[in-house]
Amino acid sequence: MIREVLKMGDPFLLQAARPVEAFDTPGLHALLADMRETMAHLNGAGLAAPQIGVGLQVVVFGVDRNDRYPRAEEVPDTVLINPVLTPLSDELEEDWEGCLSVPGLRGMVPRHARLRYQGFDERGNRIDRSVSGFHARVVQHECDHLQGILYPMRIRDFSKFGFIQALFPGEEILEE
């Protein structure tokens, strides 16, 4: 089922999510099905459970070919539960980000260039990956939602934050 995505300003998005305690349950599978359907419907690169009003440490992400991020490399379809992120260097990269909870806007956000993420899939199998580039950016963005952080909170230079049409006139970038 396609769920409503909460928008910036909703106090629920500022709350920290709780860890998942039981894996491979009908409720968890139903949540993931709704998250995937919602993300696909909105052409998102990822979605965190708090964005649809569920306070659990669950994110889904993956990019095959996404019109919202036309220059992004592919990211494997992933369910990540109870994640732990570990930067692999101090190097930060700045790039444009958008969010389904912050529709119509983009901002330049610094993120760790390389990181390791660990957690579990929906069946409780361990996940342990080291990634870089857009993959690392997506993971950090989605996991921020689990801590009540929206990407505008990470922007350093607000001259690089604004409406898509104003920032990228004439470019074919889909809005949320």
Image (cartoon, rainbow, N blue to C red):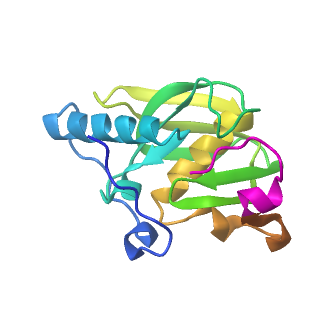
- Does the segment drawn in magenta span residue 171? yes
Q: Residue 51: which quarter of the image?
A: bottom left
* Location of residue 61 with respect to 154 vertically, above or below: above
Residue at 81% across, 59% down: 167
Residue at 74% across, 66% down: 162
* Location of residue 148 with respect to 169 vertically, above or below: below
Main SS class of the magenta portion in the image: loop
Residue at 64% across, 53% down: 98
Q: Residue furthest left?
A: 26
Query: Would residue 122 be seen by someone viewing this image from the given angle?
Result: yes
- Does the segment drawn in magenta span residue 37? no
Query: Would residue 108 be seen by someone viewing this image from the given angle?
Result: no
Q: Residue furthest front?
A: 170
Residue 48 percent coordinates (x, y): 43, 49
Residue 158 percent coordinates (x, y): 80, 72
Residue 66 percent coordinates (x, y): 62, 31
* Location of residue 151 with respect to 172 vertically, above or below: below
- Total numbered circles: 0
Locate the N terminus and report the quarter of the image it occupies: top left
Q: Which residues are magenta?
A: 163-176
Q: Along the horizontal axis of the image, is 113 left or right of 45?
A: right
Q: Along the horizontal axis of the image, is 63 left or right of 80?
A: right
